[in-house]
Image: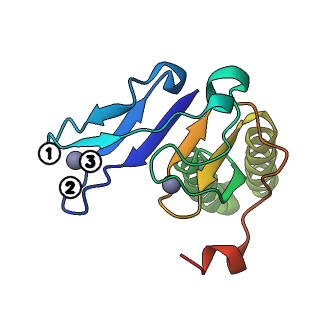
Amino acid sequence: MQVRYHCPNSECVAIIEYEPLESSPGSIDCPRCKQTHPLNVSESMVREKTVDNCAVCGNRELFIRKDFPQKIGFAVVLVAGLSSIYFFRTNFMLAYIVLAAAVVIDLLLYFVIGKVTTCYACRAEYRKSVLNPAHEGFDLATSEKY
Ligand SMILES: [Zn+2]
Ligand SMILES: [Zn+2]
């Protein structure tokens, strides 16, 4: 399992990635601010690769979202948009084909990408884990508690 989170030190902007979380020593030194902070790996993370509570902040409410690579999605839309503008003036049919291809690529990306478990409280992200059936998609009402 891989964890990715913002350094808990509020004055630090580091994004820390650790893998495999299962073999974490229990605490980590931030590579930027050098502060040591705990990383609490639970029993179920070690044995089942399932996140039950957040290893960074201990919060028990997490949600699951698609791990959509936003930069790639944006690039596809941008390239398709620009080239279709060009083709609309020269070859109308081709412009439509380019736009249709962009939609198909976006859809394909949507289906092949993985899922990521995210902490409501600190937004730590857990990848390559076995999804916890107790976790659901993002819920705005739950999110507003934090
Ligand atoms: Zn830090
Ligand atoms: Zn958390």
Question: The residue tagged with tag 1: helix, strand or loop?
Answer: loop
Is the residue indicated by label 2 positioned so its CB lies within 8 Å of ligand 1?
A: yes
Q: Do the numbered discs 1 and 3 sit on residues whose CB atoms are within 8 Å?
A: yes
Rate crowding at label 3 as few (under 14), some (14 to 19) or many (20 or more) other CA atoms within 10 Å: some
Residue 144: image location, x then y, percent = 60, 81
- Kindly identify which residue carries mark 2: 12
Mark toward the viewer: 1 or 3: 1
Rate crowding at label 1 as few (under 14), some (14 to 19) or many (20 or more) other CA atoms within 10 Å: few
- Kindly identify which residue carries mark 3: 14
Question: The residue tagged with tag 3: helix, strand or loop?
Answer: loop
Q: Do the numbered discs 2 and 3 sit on residues whose CB atoms are within 8 Å?
A: yes
Residue 71 lies left or right of residue 113; in this view the side is left
Number of numbered discs overlaid on the protein picture: 3
Q: Do the numbered discs 2 and 1 sit on residues whose CB atoms are within 8 Å?
A: yes
Which colour scheme appears in the figure?
Answer: rainbow
| Mark 1–mark 3 distance (CA, rounded to whole Å) | 8 Å
Rendered view: 14 above or below 142: above
What's the amino acid at mark 1?
Cys
Is the residue indicated by label 3 positioned so its CB lies within 8 Å of ligand 1?
A: yes
Nearer to us in this view, 44 or 5: 44
What's the amino acid at mark 2?
Cys
